[in-house]
Amino acid sequence: MAFYEQEVGVLIPEDKLQARVKELGAQITRDYAGKELTLVCVLKGSTFFAMDLARAVDLPLTLEFLGVSSYQGGTETTGEVRITTDVSKPMAGKHLLIIEDIIDTGLTMSFLLENLRARHPASLKLCSLLEKPSRARTKIDIDYKGFVIDDLFVVGYGLDFAEKLRNVPFIGVMKGK
Ligand code: XMP
Ligand code: MG
């Protein structure tokens, strides 16, 4: 029995996740054909998704990583975001595709889009595995979206509970929460 089985129930099983990642990869492959693509992976939650997605994109691409931290007011993000790890190269003139795990209130992504747009990329689009529209506080256009979910706290496939459970291989919900 896996270490998480008592604690975590399945919301989106592994085979559904992987099938959707393949579809998104094929779509991105078509859309960016002939262009030099840079995936900007948002640490740490998007990394499992981003690494699977990168392998599903049949194009030469570059990986960059960006760490952000949202200031918390109680359990809610306040919308004040800080970059904790920046990308390694200038982003000017590049075709950037941000890879995120989840858009919840949208406040983190609103900051990130504005921050990256100010660096004058050739293009800027967003790919998010999950969206929780019921919690949106600002409108974020997601160019490539994996799944829309209800207002549940989810873990696994990169998403954590107090930094743990990222290595659960599916999107899960905590039992009894
Ligand atoms: P906002 O509200 O700014 O938040 O869109 C985005 C960030 O909050 C985290 N987040 C979650 N993390 N399970 C998690 O493990 C969740 O259900 C969840 N909802 C939001 C996540 O880091 C995301 O980037
Ligand atoms: Mg995140």
Image: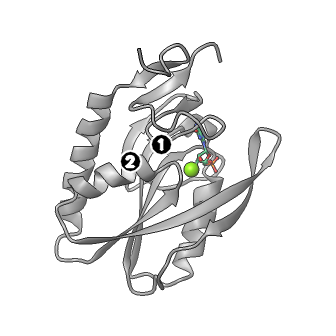
Which quadrant is the C terminus positioned in? Answer: top right
Specify few, some or many for label 2: CA neighbours under 10 Å numbering under 14, 14-19, or 20 or more. many
Specify few, some or many for label 1: CA neighbours under 10 Å numbering under 14, 14-19, or 20 or more. many
Colouring chosen for the image of the structure: one colour
- CA–CA distance in space, label 1 to label 2: 7 Å
The image's mark for residue 49 is 2
Q: Write down the quadrant of residue 108 in the picture.
A: bottom right
The image's mark for residue 174 is none
Label 2 element class: helix
Q: 175 or 105, which lies in front?
A: 175
Q: Is residue 98 above or below residue 76?
A: below
Q: Amino acid at mark 2?
A: Phe
Q: Amino acid at mark 1?
A: Gly
Q: Position of residue 161 (x, y in %)?
A: 62, 34
Q: Position of residue 89 (x, y in %)?
A: 47, 83
- Residue hosting label 1: 158
Q: Write down the quadrant of residue 58 in the picture.
A: bottom left
Residue drawn 57% across the image and 73% down it: 86
Residue drawn 58% across the image and 15% down it: 175
Left/right placement of residue 75 relative to residue 157 reads right
Q: Is residue 44 above or below residue 15?
A: below
Q: Position of residue 158 (x, y in %)?
A: 48, 42
Label 1 element class: loop
Q: Position of residue 18 (x, y in %)?
A: 27, 38
Q: Earlier in the sequence, mark 1 or mark 2?
A: 2
Left/right placement of residue 93 relative to residue 23 reads right
Q: Write down the quadrant of residue 7 in the picture.
A: top right
Task: Check whether the beta carbons of the residues at disc 1 and disc 2 lie within 8 A of each other.
Answer: yes
Number of on-image labels: 2
Residue drawn 68% across the image and 57% down it: 69
